[in-house]
Image (cartoon, coloured by chain):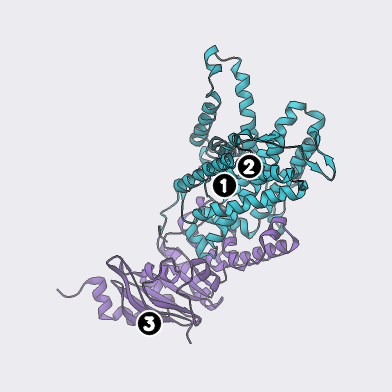
Chain colours: A cyan, B purple
Amino acid sequence: MRFIFKTDYEQDIRLFKHGGQVFWYGLLGIVLLAAPWWAGEYVMSQLHFILIYSIVGFGLMMLVGFTGQISLGHAAFLAVGAYTEALMQAAGVPFVVSIASAAAFSAAVGVIVGLPALRLKGIYLAIATLAFNVIVEEIITRWESLTGGNSGKHVKPVEMFGYALESDAAFYYLCLVLATMCCLGCINLLRSPTGRAFVAIRDSEISASCMGVNLAKYKTMSFALSAALTGIGGALYAHKLAFISPEQFTLLVSIELITIVILGGIGFLHGAVLGAAFVIVLPQLISLAKDYLPEGTAALSGLQATVFGLMLVLFIIFEPMGLYGRWLKVRTWFELFPFYRRGMFRRQKAYMKSERLR
Amino acid sequence: MSFFRAESLSIHFGGVVAVDKVSFEVEKGEVFTIIGPNGAGKTTIFNLIGLLYRPSEGRIVFEDRDMTGLNPSEVAALGIARTFQNIELFEHATVLQNLLIGRHRHSGTAFWEELLFLPRVKRAELAHREAVEKVIDFLDLAHYRESLVAGLPYGVRKVVELGRALATEPKLLLLDEPSSGLNPEETDDMAFWIEDIKKELGITVLMVEHDMNLVSRVSDRVLALNMGAAIAQGTAAEVQRHPAVIEAYLGGPA
């Protein structure tokens, strides 16, 4: 077990808390930077998806995991980002500008969706965002002059400073840089007043407002931030797929995205990455497993959705803290061996909550 | 010119008049206590002052400023902090993080600065931590600094909540039953802290309390409520002797 002897306030806010973290994150960084050398074409492609989904995961984690606002409509922000990028690229706008616009436009839409969140909670908010997803999907399908409707839209590879990033490695580095930037942005927010305000809203809206947190402002901000990150993810997604159509942004995708944060571990940024990796790798595992399944089952079309649903339910029942929570438990078990207790991570039921006003 | 004034404050929920034209004034630097039997409307008055409820009638004036139309976060920004009767802490955060939320009204950094964690944000963070550390020192919470609130005993949570309110550096501190759920020793500590808050930190305290021992020990003035209406006001001893108060608690002659 590591005990950190604190002698300075700065130790609480610095990025790496101790030498061990520097080592492991450094190693991770090197392995990721070297990926084009050790990964084959197939693995590279999976890494692209994992990084893109991680960015979306960060966005969703800030909203769901840290601000406590549920969204079942994030595929819509993904779509807004993807179509903004596709249309702007087609209009000849440079990539740096177009991806920033994708983020900004998604954020603006996020603010609009955030407005009902000021009045709605829990399942009602989920339904409102779900409706938003359907609306956006419908708009994209109908507005054929702009989006190409159901026949979709082709997206060319990213072009930066006159070079087309056509190779897998180039696009990979682009995704890696953006994902790292998004991650750092989230970490920075979480160690500043804004991040604390988000967490305060999640844990107790009433006492957050009594501490001077403007609920309307911070909830809207959280939605905008979440939408912006998802928009960036959407823009990269469009380039990765090279072809976008309304079917890629359905309600099922929204559920897949929320699966990222739940499986990964609500309330941990690590969870977003782990969840993204899991959601990308799981379908591959399923298709591998199909070879060993009886003839009839392998042909069933709903197999993937069933497994996803099953995983979600199992995680919620047996490991509500998700993959990252499981990792924390395993690590603590080794650190404290043989003194680990079963109840160590159990969240205690709160005492009576006072003054439930609404 | 008065520090804090409630003018004929009333609220009714449907036909129920919870608070009926209650007026009182709090002087700067005093401990003002509101007492009354269960359901007298004490906590409702607190929620009115915090503007969690909108008064149906009357005004609330703080430092000569009518704050009746504000929303709760703006009230906090004026320098009014409160604790809750049944504790409303951020359960899944550490004590330190809870207190840091109290610093929210002093945070002046913009969103984009925080996104990049500019040196200015870092300096502000260090200053916040120093301020919080003073509160931790004051309330003797050092032992629990890094503990999750969810795992702390009730008495400690109560102190953490007091600390969170103090971290806002309020001018007026509203304490809703600071001793409820505490054992005699903890209540004793609470009495010391309230005295220190008044004397050392110079913060005006407005509290609701049942424990008459604590009330007579720390309060400068006491207001007694019954059925939403003010029935007596004065020093603790005067109010305790007041016939209307005795009647409210024990019932009048049949």
Query: Cα distance, mark 3 to mark 1?
Result: 50 Å
Rendered location of residue A245, percent (x, y): 62, 35
A99, A39: nearer the viewer: A99
Confirm whether circles 2 and 1 share one chain.
yes
Query: Cα distance, mark 3 to mark 2?
Result: 78 Å
Rendered location of residue A114, percent (x, y): 54, 53
> Which residue matches tag 3?
B235
Element assignment for label 2: helix
- Most extreme residue toward the top is A295
Kindly indicate the quadrant of the structure image that contains residue A196: bottom right
Indicate which label's residue lies in the foreground, 3 or 2: 2
Callout 2 environment at 10 Å: few (<14), some (14 to 19), or many (20+)? few
Q: Is residue B224 visible?
A: yes
Rendered location of residue A32, percent (x, y): 77, 36
A78, A87: nearer the viewer: A87
- A190 above or below A24? below
